[in-house]
Amino acid sequence: MTTIDRRPTPVTSIAHHTMPQPGPIARLFEPRRIGKMSPMTAFVVYGGLLFWTVIVVFPLYWLLVTSVKLPIDVNEGPRYLPFIDFQPSAHAWRYVFIDIGGDTFRPYVNSLIIATVSTVLAMLVGSMAAYALVRIEYRPSLGSIVMFLACLAAAIVAVVAAGVPWWIAAVGLVAVFLLLLRAIGRRFQRRLGNADIQFWIISQRILPPVVVALPIYVMFQNLGLLNTRTAFIITYATINLPIVVWLMHDFFASIPIDLEESAQLDGASRYRIFFDIVLPLAKPGIAATGLLVLVLAWNEYLLALFLSGADVQTMPLLVAAQNATRGPQWWYMSVLIVIMIVPVVTIALFLQRLIARGLLVGSVKG
C-alpha cells in the first residue's frame, strides 16, 4: 500500500522574490498610477502646450503694448515691458476714439452690419442647399445646362452690344430657356449627380476674387448699388456660400435619417423637418461654420477696396489707411486691430464648446 506524504510543502519567503525598486531616473518615465502621465511625459506635454500658448498669445500682447506706446518708443524699440522699458501713454486710443471718433465708428458699424447680415444670409441659403444635396437626389441633364449657358451668353450680348435693358434681357432669357427646355429637353440623356453639383459649387470658391472684382464693380454700378451696404452683403454672402455648402454637407449627412422619416410619417413638411429637427441637431456645425464665415467676411479687403467709398468703408480699409506718407502708423493700427478682433474673440469664447464639437465632427472629413 502506497503511503502519501501529507506534510505541508515549505513556502519560500516572499521577501526573497521581491521586484527590484526602480531608480530615481526610471521613476521619471513611469506613471505613478493608472490613467496618469509619467512626470517626464507630463513635463514634455505641458511644456509644449505652454510654448505654443506663448506663440499664440504673444502677437496679442504685442498689439496691446504697441497701442500704448508713443511713436518714439515704437521707432526706438523694441520695448516689451510697460513702466520698465517705456512709459505707457493713451494718446493712440484718444486719437482713435476722440480725435477721429466719427471716422472710426462709421467703418466699425459698417463692418458689424455687413459681416453679420451676410453671414446669416450665407448660412441660411447654404445650409438649405447642403441639406438638399444630402437628402434629395438631383439628376440635371448636361444638355439643359449647356442650353442655359448659351441663352445667358445671348442675353449678355443683347445687353452689351444692342443696349437692351438688363431686366428685359433677363425675362427673355428665362422665357426662351423654358420654351427650349420644354421642346427638346427630353432628348438629353447624359445627366449629372449630387456629387457633380457639390464640386461645381465649391469650385466657385477656388476662383481668385481678383478675377471677378471688376465685373462685380461694373454690375453694381449699373444697378445703382455701388457704395452701399447692400452690395457688400450680396457679394460677401455669395463668395462665402460655397464654404457653407461644403462644410454643412457633412454635418447633415451625419444626422440619422430615421428621425426625419418619422416626422414625415406624422405629416411634417420638408421645411418643418429642416428647421425643427435638422438645424437643432446641427448646432455644432452651424457654430463652427458660422464663425469661419464671419471671420472671412469681417477680414475681407480686396472686394471691399473695389466696392466701398467714403460712406461704406469697412475696418480692414481703415486699418490699411494708417499706412500714410510718413510710413505705417503702428500705434494707431494696433488700437484699430485690438477693437477689430474683440467681437470675433467674444463670439468664439461664448461658442467655444459648440465650435470644438463642430471642428471634431468636421475633422473626420479632412
Image: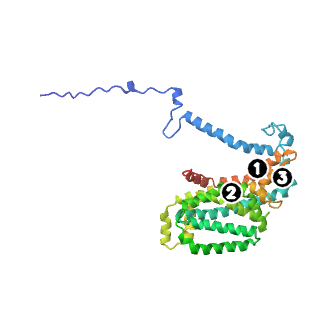
> What quarter of the picture does the N terminus occupy?
top left
What SS does tag 3 mark?
Answer: helix
Q: Which is closer to the viewer, label 2 or label 3? A: 2
Residue 171 in picture, x, y percent from top left: 69, 74
Residue 229 can be seen in this image: no
Q: Amino acid at mark 2?
A: Leu
Q: Could you say which disc has been placed on residue 285 in the image?
A: none
Compare residues 92 and 360 and report the one nearer the observer. Answer: 360
Cα distance, mark 3 to mark 1?
A: 12 Å
Q: Is residue 324 above or below residue 228?
A: above
- Judging by the rendered image, the residue that carries numbered circle 2 is 294
Q: CA distance from mark 2 to mark 3?
A: 24 Å
In the rendered image, which residue does mark 3 sit on?
96
Secondary structure under tag 1 reads helix
Under mark 1, the amino acid is: Val
Residue 164 coordinates in the image, percent (x, y): 75, 72
Q: Amino acid at mark 3?
A: Val
The residue under label 1 is 338
Judge left or right: residue 254 versus residue 127: left
How many numbered discs sit on the rendered protein? 3
In the rendered image, residue 176, in percent from the top left (x then y), is placed at 64, 74
Figure quadrant of residue 290: bottom right
Q: Nearer the viewer, mark 2 or mark 1?
A: 2
Q: Nearer the viewer, residue 259 or 65?
A: 259
> Is the residue marked by circle 3 packed among few (<14), some (14-19), or many (20+) residues within 10 Å?
some
Task: Name the residue nearer the viewer: 34 or 49.
Answer: 49
Query: Residue at left 41%, top 27%?
Result: 18
The answer to whether marks 3 and 1 mark residues whose Cβ atoms lie closer than 8 Å is: no
